Amino acid sequence: MDNLDFEGERESDILITIDGRSGAGKGTLAEHISEVMDIQRFSAGDFFRNIAEEKGLTVGELSEKADKETDLEVDRRTFQKGLDENCVIEARISCHVMGDHSDLRIRLKADLDERSRRVAERENISEEEARSRIIKRDRDNKERYRDYYGIDMDDLTIYDLIIDNTELSIEETNKLIEKALEVHFDV
């Protein structure tokens, strides 16, 4: 699988990517992998916040103004960071962005009810509000990634590991990933 037409030489020894929709547990799993592997953790959200700061905008303001070029810049920065440093990167399409440069491509899944519960708890909003936001965001992201890159968000064939953690605890998910890390990296 090719990356999304970004070019560069990889300097990093370890690159793990995690994709998933809002509330799937990407950040939680990335943090655990970062600790276990003693590598940096990055999120596409980190790069988005950096762009907002550079433009003198709040994240909300940039979100309102965000266009294709903003998304592409986030993806370029994600790609470059993955080439430069041993790290785990979590985003909605980091596995696509990094392509074959990624040593382990993980997709996290959870059903809408569980993702809504998690987002509501994290953002201190009602589950109904969280559900509404997630549905809109999922639909918008699916359309954008198809239009920008031709990515089918429902195609799971690019992933080395798919974990549906709807009914798994964080500890159970962590144990699964530790086994995968042992197999892929001899840790």
Image: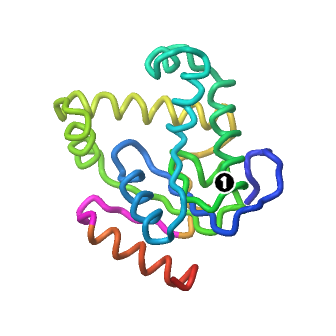
Which residue is label 1 attached to?
Answer: 82
108 or 175: nearer the eye? 175
Q: Is residue 73 left or right of residue 48?
A: right
165 in magenta = yes
Q: Quadrant of residue 78?
A: top right
Residue 154, horizontal then vertical, whole percent = 51, 50
65 or 159: nearer the eye? 65
The crowding category of the residue bearing disc 1, from other C-alpha atoms within 10 Å (few below 14, some 14 to 19, many at least 20), is many
**Helix, strand or loop status at disc 1:** helix
Question: Tag count in the figure?
Answer: 1
Q: Quadrant of residue 179?
A: bottom left
Which segment did they paint magenta?
161-170
Q: Quadrant of residue 150?
A: top right
11 in magenta = no
Residue 181, above or below 59 = below
Q: Is residue 51 left or right of residue 100?
A: left
Residue 125, horizontal then vertical, whole percent = 19, 30
Residue sitting at x 74%, y 52%? 3
Quarter holding the N terminus is bottom right
Residue 163, horizontal then vertical, whole percent = 40, 65
Residue 89, horizontal then vertical, whole percent = 55, 53
Residue sitting at x 49%, y 83%? 182
Residue sitting at x 52%, y 38%? 46
Q: Amino acid at mark 1?
A: Gly
Residue 57, above or below 86 = above
